[in-house]
Image (cartoon, rainbow, N blue to C red):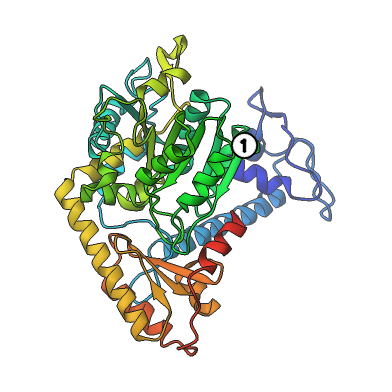
């Protein structure tokens, strides 16, 4: 409160802020804004009012400050009201449907925990001296996800990130660089922008190769083989994207290994960015569910050396977060003990909020079958949207596994009103769990039929536009 009053006084009459004033009350001297406002400024200057007597309470100045405080409070209330309106649009109003954030899991049982700090500093496998942590819960979350991706806790390790898959990609590439310091880095033109960003942070950008992607967003494996062959004397670090940003395309990790074999490069490290599609596809039980399994032949090359996912995109957590999983042999290279916290520094960030782990744990309590049902409902809704768009004359398509439906970009008013992500003349809707058919019908009614039906665009500009902005 006194800080707000200080702000209110400071803007008056060119004072440049309320300097600490000395005020005498009952024979004692006190200082600071609280004393000044309670008892009056000793050196008050009220321009236009002839000034005030020293050591007197300046009623005019205090009244002016209170008017300004009321203005600040009204402004803050207005900001909060606007924020609530955007977070809870209400019936009949558009919901953001272009960015992935599931909303169908209730986290209100955790509300009381947000009144206190939970700090999971460092390695989740060592509790350390800070007792206000949720590391036991974090270990349970990591263990379930390692198992989902076919791994074993004896061989794999992980932690809950602060910043979704962006931090997961940074950590994964950090491990890769420490594994092969002289390697070249390969990622597709459709990879998330956090991948080249991580390469710049880690000083790997001079050794980056942006591999072509096909029209649907999947990596071009022939182009990968060609690029690796040109650098056959160097190890290869490859980022495979499982659910690209715009089209939710999936890079085939097995075909990446085949391309590296063709090029004759055995020293390799594969990081998988599974931000959106990693968990849904692992729940299907296909190749993604074996990314962290051991090779049956005992060879040194695994399907993946590290995997990251986002928590808020599929698990509906109210705060952005993620999980990164990796082979222990890679994590050991970057780990060291920190004595004053009695812990291990093995994570990208130091202090990490433990609230994220608790939220993910609550989401996982839905059970694997429950999450499979969520996946099925989202895919069914995406198929429904795709069918309705085509029937209305819009050029639209989707991958069979995807929550994402691509459509030729509609008018700007629709893009902004419904928060559609757009690149290269294409937009998308992501049918995450929690999005209802009623909301989709509302969107379709506002969108209407395509006035340019029969003159739709081809798919190629999706990737061209994305590559241009990466």
Quarter assignment of residue 342: top left
Quarter assignment of residue 111: top left
User: Relative to the observer, which residue lies in front, 341 or 224?
Assistant: 224
User: Relative to the observer, which residue lies in front, 291 or 95?
Assistant: 291
Find residue 174 and report its horizontal and vertical position in percent.
51, 30
Q: Is residue 354 visible?
A: yes
* Residue under the image location 56 percent in, 44 percent down: 227
Q: Is residue 227 left or right of residue 269?
A: right
Q: Is residue 438 placed above or below 10 in the rendered structure?
A: below
How many other residues sit within 10 Å of disc 1, few (<14), some (14-19) or many (≥20)? Answer: few
Find residue 1 and report its horizontal and vertical position in percent.
55, 42
* Residue under the image location 33 percent in, 47 percent down: 278
Find residue 293 and report its horizontal and vertical position in percent.
26, 33
Q: Is residue 164 visible?
A: no
Q: Residue furthest left?
A: 369
- How many numbered discs, if any? 1
Q: Is residue 209 placed above or below 300 in the rendered structure?
A: below
Find residue 352 and report its horizontal and vertical position in percent.
43, 31
User: Relative to the observer, which residue lies in front, 153 or 263?
Assistant: 263
Q: Is residue 274 left or right of residue 18?
A: left
The residue labelled by disc 1 is 207
Q: Is residue 2 placed above or below 215 in the rendered structure?
A: above
* Residue under the image location 48 percent in, 77 percent down: 414
Label 1, secondary structure: give it. Answer: helix
Quarter assignment of residue 290: top left
């Amino acid at each position: 409160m006194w800080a707000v009053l200080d702000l209110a006084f400071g803007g008056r009459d060119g004072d440049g802020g309320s300097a600490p004033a000395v005020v005498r009350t009952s024979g004692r001297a006190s200082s600071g804004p609280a004393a000044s406002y309670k008892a009056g400024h000793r050196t008050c200057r009220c321009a236009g009012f002839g000034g005030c007597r020293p050591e007197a309470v300046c009623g005019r100045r205090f009244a002016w400050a209170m008017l300004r405080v009321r203005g600040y409070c009204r402004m803050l209330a207005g900001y909060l009201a606007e924020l609530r309106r955007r977070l809870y649009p209400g019936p009949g109003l558009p919901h953001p449907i272009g960015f992935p954030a599931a909303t169908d899991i209730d986290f209100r049982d955790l509300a009381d925990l947000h009144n206190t700090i939970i700090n999971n500093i460092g390695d989740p496998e060592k509790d350390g001296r800070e007792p206000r942590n949720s590391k036991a819960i974090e270990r349970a979350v990591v263990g379930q996800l390692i198992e989902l991706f076919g791994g074993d806790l004896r061989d794999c390790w992980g932690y809950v990130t602060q910043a979704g898959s962006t931090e997961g990609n940074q950590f994964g590439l950090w491990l890769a660089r420490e594994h092969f310091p002289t390697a070249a880095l390969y990622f597709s033109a459709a990879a998330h922008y956090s991948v080249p960003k991580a390469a710049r942070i880690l000083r790997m950008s001079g050794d980056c190769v942006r591999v072509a992607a096909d029209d649907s967003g999947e990596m071009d494996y022939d182009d990968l083989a060609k690029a690796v062959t040109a650098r056959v004397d160097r190890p290869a670090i490859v980022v495979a994207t499982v659910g690209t940003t715009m089209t939710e395309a999936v890079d085939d990790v097995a075909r990446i290994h085949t391309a590296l074999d063709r090029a004759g490069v055995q020293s390799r490290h594969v990081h998988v960015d599974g931000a959106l599609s990693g968990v849904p596809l692992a729940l299907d039980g296909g190749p993604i569910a074996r990314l962290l399994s051991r090779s049956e032949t005992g060879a040194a090359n695994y399907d993946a050396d590290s995997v990251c996912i986002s928590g808020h995109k599929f698990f509906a957590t109210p705060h952005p977060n993620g999980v990164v999983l990796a082979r222990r042999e890679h994590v050991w290279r970057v780990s060291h003990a920190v004595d004053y916290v009695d812990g291990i520094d093995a994570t990208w960030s130091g202090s990490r909020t433990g609230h994220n782990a608790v939220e993910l744990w609550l989401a996982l309590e839905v059970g694997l079958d429950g999450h499979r049902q969520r996946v099925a409902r989202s895919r069914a809704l995406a198929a429904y949207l795709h069918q309705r768009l085509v029937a209305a004359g819009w050029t639209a398509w989707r991958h069979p596994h995807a929550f994402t439906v691509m459509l030729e970009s509609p008018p700007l008013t629709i893009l902004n009103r419904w928060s559609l992500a757009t690149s290269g003349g294409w937009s998308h809707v992501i049918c995450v769990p929690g999005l209802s058919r009623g909301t989709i019908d509302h969107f379709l009614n506002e969108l209407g039929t395509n006035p340019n039906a029969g003159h739709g665009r081809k798919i190629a500009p999706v990737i061209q536009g994305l590559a241009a902005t990466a």
